Amino acid sequence: MQEWERSSTTRVVPPARPRKLAKVPFAELADGRLQGVVSSGSDIERVYVSSVAAGSYAFTCSTNNNRPCGGARGSFCNHIRALLAEAVLQYGGERVARYLKVEVTDEEPTAQAITEAMTATRPEQGDASTAAPVFSRFLRHLAYLELPPTTAPLPEMQWFPPTRAVV
Ligand SMILES: [Zn+2]
């Protein structure tokens, strides 16, 4: 019997090759966190799942194999900083700061200003159990890239109204 015949779940294989992805292939403001996937600078096969919680700025960073990130002891690692920089590009500084409840004086704060405001509060390390769902959402997000181009609506996506990811 094959493994897939015995198992109730099938192994998830990323449909896109990691080397085709940019530094931060996935970033979202969802579940009260900024969360996303950051490519390893040194190993093309490895990615990190990083997150920062709104309000508390509790942070997590671990690899897709659930190994804790060595850089994220005590403060934000480079992956979390890269995620913040990418989120500011994607959503704008004002929206990222508002979502994370960061007090900044600038109307359109830079990623650096937001990062500094958060690290100044000496945030705690958060619960790393959030990494698995974030990573599976990333794989799902990649799966949509594999669909043939079409102008017809994707019924599956209608379960998730676009307003869900933002405040
Ligand atoms: Zn890290």
Image: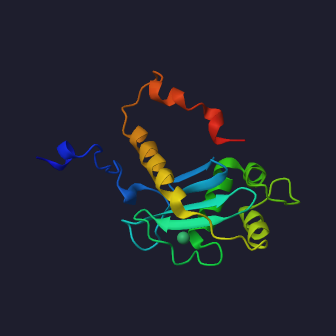
Residue at position x 24%, y 46% in the image: 7
Residue at screen point 72% across, 70% down: 123
Q: Residue furthest right?
A: 105
Of residues 54 and 29, the one nearer the viewer is 54
- Residue 111 image point, x, y percent: 71, 62
Residue 166: horizontal and vertical position, in percent? 68, 41
The quadrant where ligand 1 appears is: bottom right
Would residue 81 appear left or right of 101 to someone viewing this image?
left
Q: Residue furthest left?
A: 1
- The image shows a total of numbered marks equal to 0
Report the coloring of the rendering.
rainbow
**Could one spot residue 106 in this view of the protein?**
yes
Nearest the eye: 26 or 61: 61
The reply, left or right, for residue 39 in relation to residue 28 is: left
Whether residue 37 is visible here, answered yes or no, is: no
The location of residue 73, given as percent across then percent down, is: 59, 78
Relative to residue 42, is residue 6 depicted above or below?
A: above
The residue at 60%/60% (across/down) is 51
Seen at 73% across and 55% down, the residue is 100
x then y, percent, for residue 28: 60, 49
Report the quarter where the C terminus lies.
Answer: top right
Q: Quadrant of residue 161?
A: top right
Residue 146, picture quadrant: top left
